[in-house]
Image (cartoon, coloured by chain):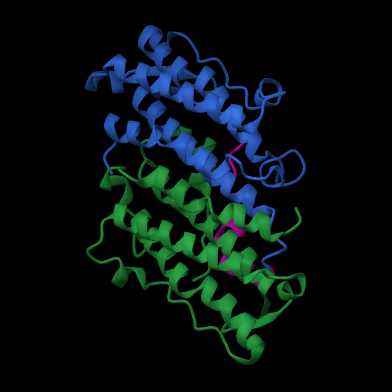
Chain colours: A green, B blue
Amino acid sequence: MEQTLSHTLSLLERTPASLDALLRGLPPEWTSQNEGDNSWSAYDVVGHFIHGERTDWMPRARMILKYGETQTFVPFDRFAQSRESQGKSLAQLLDEFSRLRAENLAELRAMNLQSEDFARRGRHPALGAVTMSQLLAAWVVHDLTHLHQISRILSHQYREAVGPWTKFLGVLQCAGHSAP
Amino acid sequence: MEQTLSHTLSLLERTPASLDALLRGLPPEWTSQNEGDNSWSAYDVVGHFIHGERTDWMPRARMILKYGETQTFVPFDRFAQSRESQGKSLAQLLDEFSRLRAENLAELRAMNLQSEDFARRGRHPALGAVTMSQLLAAWVVHDLTHLHQISRILSHQYREAVGPWTKFLGVLQCAGHSAP
């Protein structure tokens, strides 16, 4: 499929409502459990989405336009949500994500990016030179990575309960975790 | 997490709306593409959900109550959707899934299953003896398997576009496919 700004926006604008429909009102036994050890719960993942809206995608898009490769992006804090979500209900986090995403997409549309802008480069602290186009595609696939993760976290809670069905249920075989 | 009918219902009743929020109105470039070869598109997966509502989960629950292990479940046709979805729009399929799921969950509630019912056994054509409890848990994880799959199918469309971000995006490393 060809990458276009319109395709990118169409996916990015649907994520908050999809997450909301899946998670809002779901008993906390589902949303506060993780996959063991220091893994994340669905609640943690929503906090991570919020942190990305505040500090990752659009701030980096702005940096590419303003500084190109001369300034390195601020490293993304993958554990910020444990601090920032404190005291908030899942419903509050879902509202916050939805609001921030809408604001960010309004800003992205207002940037009115032209074809030459998609080839502009910025500097990622770990990956080196990256283009605007790659940043926007990564934003989309980051959304999908965490929908994918949430479906796996929830499945994990019924891992034993499915008994012999395990082998027919692909999500229980998933090892598609993001690199730390 | 303890398996309860209430936990099971709370997840099963949210899947149609979550899928709807993600897929309805998304450009067909996203929803009609697959992961190559004979893999499924998001459109195909919604058809598969519908076929499951019609022929798999509740028909099997009824068989367990009625026949126990004396009759084997009808094998599930994993390719029925290519025939049954023909000529239907994705929006029609999403409506149909939502309606069938609501009907099935109303029937499940009306069954008024008691604790001894969850231990009742049926006979699966490939897995042998399975309990009502396992069937209901598998229904939930089947939903999540296909949400997981849809996030992977959509991600695949931007696999090249993300460039060096690939390694940070777990969904692109997923090999959690269901057994054929």
Magenta stretch, residue numbers: B163-180
With respect to residue B102, does B138 lie above or below?
below
With respect to residue A130, does B143 lie above or below?
above
Q: Position of residue B66 (x, y in %)?
A: 38, 7
Q: Is residue B65 visible?
A: yes
Q: Position of residue B119 (x, y in %)?
A: 30, 22
Q: Is residue B176 visible?
A: no
Q: Position of residue B136 (x, y in %)?
A: 38, 28
Q: Nearer the viewer, residue B166 or A7?
A: A7
Q: Residue at image x 42%, y 56%?
A: A98
With respect to residue A123, does B75 lie above or below?
above
Q: Nearer the viewer, residue B129 or A82?
A: A82
Quarter residue A57 falls in: bottom right
Q: Residue at image x 62%, y 80%?
A: A127
Quarter residue A131 falls in: bottom right
Q: Residue at image x 36%, y 22%?
A: B132
Q: Nearer the viewer, residue B95 or B116?
A: B95
